[in-house]
Amino acid sequence: MLAYLRRIGVVPSAEPVVQDISADVSLLVEEYRRFLVNERGLAEVSIRRYLPAACVFLAGLPSPLEAELGRLSAAQVSQFVIDQAGLRSVPDAKSMVTALRSLLRFLFVTGRIDRELAAAVPAVANRKLSSLPGRLRAGEADLLLGSCHRDTAAGRRDFAILTVLARLGLRACEAAGMQLSDIDWRTGELTVHGKGGLDDRLLLPSDVGEALVDYLLHGRPAGTAATSVFLTARAPRRGITADGIRGVVAHACQRAGIPRAGAHRLRHTVASDLLGAGSALPEIGQVLRHRSQLSTATYAKIDRNRLRELARPWPGGSR
């Protein structure tokens, strides 16, 4: 129904569609893509989020493109964001402005614009600290693990994936990117390929190691050339993707009879449990491999007992 309504123009498209982009736009977008890969070291999933906004912005400029970029102004950039924000959800608009800032930095570095216009991109209004970090309720993580049919190859794989997410707090892309060579069985360590091409070594808890061993010995197909730890359940056997990891979590929620949750919810649960056990925020940041303390600070909001100490008494109240 929604697809039909979009086709007849009653409701706007979910994503701005750019059709028949000019050759100069196509070439510039391809150069930008190579810049993101070679200079920024972004993962493919991030690049796929950046390119659509770049296409929409560049395709909206008059021809010839290079000359128009030389005349690009901050007012044009701001107006583009204002026009696009009304067509998008808040998360999508935030992703769009992030991609636009990245594109403008690329244009400045390559000399196509003579001013750094990334600062001209307005921020999307979003009360980031107004809600609490989402986490699974008590016992739900055990329900997810218990929902896996460990007498099947797919069940062993799903159990290993969920154990890695629930115990180590890995992102979906990090779990999907695990390679056989990343596991050091002698030292009991796991190399995690994180954001920005950075690698971290984590201690491998015994329950995580046991789940991985059970899958590798009795669930992972033998004789495959793929080097990824987690493979697809059906042929052709290849490394599972980040979307596949999210699908494993979603199906586990369905089997366990709990509300659907994303893979990142398990990461939030790890942080919340650590905070509840008395761990300090810097320690939690090390476990989650945050590069900025601001990323970890959001979990300070869930310690309600300590937050009550900061609350001022209500005027005229007893407490």
Image (cartoon, rainbow, N blue to C red):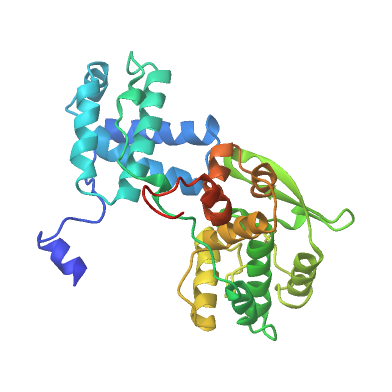
Residue 20 visible: no
Q: Which residue sits at x=66%, y=47%?
A: 193
Residue 314 higher or lower than 244, as above or below: above
Image quadrant occupied by the N terminus: bottom left
Task: Name the side, left or right, on which 208 lies relative to 112.
Answer: right
Residue 291 higher or lower than 128, as above or below: above
Residue 281 found in image quarter = top right
Residue 260 higher or lower than 255, as above or below: above
Question: Residue 94, position in %: x, y?
Answer: 35, 43
In front of the other: 45 or 283: 283
In front of the other: 218 or 259: 259
Residue 295 visible: yes
Task: Name the side, left or right, on which 75 lies relative to 42.
Answer: left
Question: Residue 224, position in %: x, y?
Answer: 70, 67
Q: Residue furthest top?
A: 114
Residue 196 found in image quarter = top right
Question: Residue 27, position in %: x, y?
Answer: 34, 32
Question: Residue 177, position in %: x, y?
Answer: 63, 54
What is the number of callouts on the image? 0
Q: Which residue sits at x=20%, y=48%?
A: 87
Residue 225 higher or lower than 75, as above or below: below
